[in-house]
Image (tube, rainbow, N blue to C red):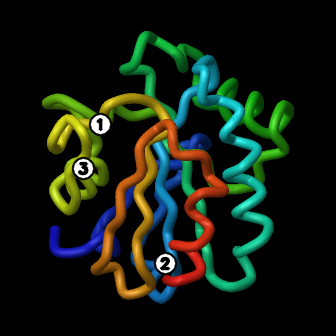
Amino acid sequence: MESIYDFKALTSKGKELDFGQFRGKVLLIVNTASKCGFTPQFAGLEELNQKYREQGLVVIGFPCNQFASQDPGSDSEIEGFCQLNYGVSFQIMKKVDVNGDNADPIFKYLKSQTKGLLGSAIKWNFTKFLISRDGNTVKRFAPITAPEKLEKDIIAM
């Protein structure tokens, strides 16, 4: 795959989402978990979503159960949890793996574009990838980076 726009993935409701529709938008892709110490970051992600979506920000959460089994629920349970507890209105995708042989192709691509503390591997839940409007610039942020700390980079893109 040449660009983030070449990918498709399944939403939590099992519908295909074509990333080609996001050309010209700033994407924030996050691997999430609903039983993690970083789970309260959903509130900050939703705040960014609300504040910048009119300017072209698209936030997308990919639940992942690879880190200490911190997202064991079904796709519908996870989506319900996010909406009920954090008012999440951004797109929640089908649960995926982000590391290993079964890693979702989107995460394989994102990891190939920018390295983290563990090289290409994702360290933990709530690793964030910010993709520019042209799809060429990818910035990676650690799980401990609070969503509000991304604001200046979002504005710059």
Q: Secondary structure at mark 3?
A: helix
Q: Nearer the viewer, residue 49 or 13?
A: 49
Q: Residue at x 37, y 20 (%)?
A: 66
The residue pinned by badge 3 equals: 105
Left or right position of 82 against 128: right
Contact (Cβ within 8 Å) of mark 3 with mark 2: no
Between disc 3 and disc 1, the foreground one is 1
Q: Secondary structure at mark 1?
A: loop
The 10 Å Cα crowd at callout 2, few under 14, some 14 to 19, many 20 or more, is: some
Q: Residue at x 29, y 42 (%)?
A: 104
The residue pinned by badge 2 equals: 22
Q: Residue at x 52, y 16 (%)?
A: 70
Q: Nearer the viewer, residue 77 or 57?
A: 57
Residue 144 at what x, y percent from top left?
50, 37
Residue type at mark 1?
Ile
Q: Which mark is residue 122?
A: 1
- The N terminus - image quarter: bottom left
Q: Quadrant of residue 85?
A: top right
Cα–Cα gap, marks 3 and 2:
17 Å
Residue 137 at what x, y percent from top left?
31, 76
